[in-house]
Image (tube, rainbow, N blue to C red):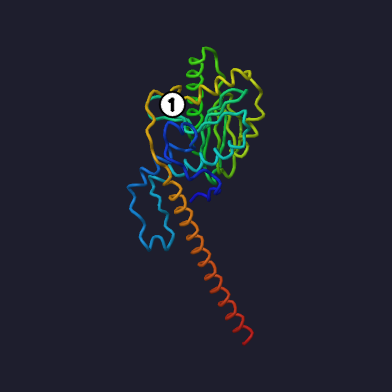
Amino acid sequence: MPSEIPPQLPLDSPALTLSTFGTVAAASVMTECLRVQAGVPRRGPLARTFGRSPLSEESLPWYLGALGELDVAKRLDSLGESWTVLHSVPIGTRGSDIDHVVVSEAGVFTINTKFHEGARVWVGSRRLLVNGQAKDHLRNARYEATRTRKLLSAAVGTEVPATGVIAIVGAKQITIREQPTDVAVLDAARLTHWLKKQRPRIDRAQTAALSALVRDAATWTDEPQHESDVSGFAELHREVVGAKQVRMLWGAALLIAILGVAASALIEFYGHAFGS
């Protein structure tokens, strides 16, 4: 079960409307998590007593995805006012979105967040493996950046530099055998430092124009943005964390009991040994 997300993350989110476009991190994955979770029966007293997770197998991936995006969003908050940062940006007509879009004088960055807690990640120029299993992360990040570059370049009438980034959250180990030429793969903890080190590629006027462009929902999609409420995710998160804490207490109690039995056995053993 995933680690507890720091309380300062924006878990208590409002209803999503046109006025909140790009401001609520993990909006689409939280919405889908809550939709799937709505069909999961509530835990009974026994399940709560023993700390069974409220999540189902179907809702767990969406929950983990939301945690990853919230983690990266919190890190991106530390960027200065000269940076434009958007979250859960819808693109096209098939319900797709980009986890995070960042604009600065270094250009546009499309950031794809991946939560791989405790995993070993290996990165080559053409492959990315998680615990030895090949993933499509590179292809997807490359596609998002290319799509964004074409869309924004057509809107402004000149070539817009756009770079795909994969931000990995929670991995035990990340081995970069060879960094891909067109996608940056980073530990999320290094993301903001890496962004700030990128050299300027557009001037201030172009940066301001791009910032205004990406903030307009019509730039990204013709589909209407429907209102949805993701505030229930905060309560679900509290339930998941609470269940984990209960399991940890039971584990600690079991360990203490085992140690107690072992200590009693040793005392009895030495008592007989010295007694004889």
Identify the residue at image location x=56%, y=77%. 264
Badge 1 density bin: few <14, some 14–19, many ≥20, Cα 10 Å: many
x%, y% of residue 191?
61, 35
In the image, residue 186 sits, relative to residue 222, either above or below, namely below
Identify the residue at image location x=53%, y=64%. 252
Q: Residue furthest front?
A: 19
In the image, residue 44 sits, relative to residue 56, either above or below, namely below
- In the shown orientation, is residue 48 left or right of residue 107? left
Residue position for label 1: 91
Q: Residue furthest bottom?
A: 275
- In the shown orientation, is residue 207 left or right of residue 254? right
Q: What residue type is labelled 1?
A: Ile
SS at circle 1: loop
x%, y% of residue 97?
44, 30
x%, y% of residue 105?
62, 23
Say which quarter of the image contains residue 196: top right
x%, y% of residue 200?
65, 22
Q: Quadrant of the C terminus?
A: bottom right
Which residue is more in the foreground, 273 or 72? Answer: 72
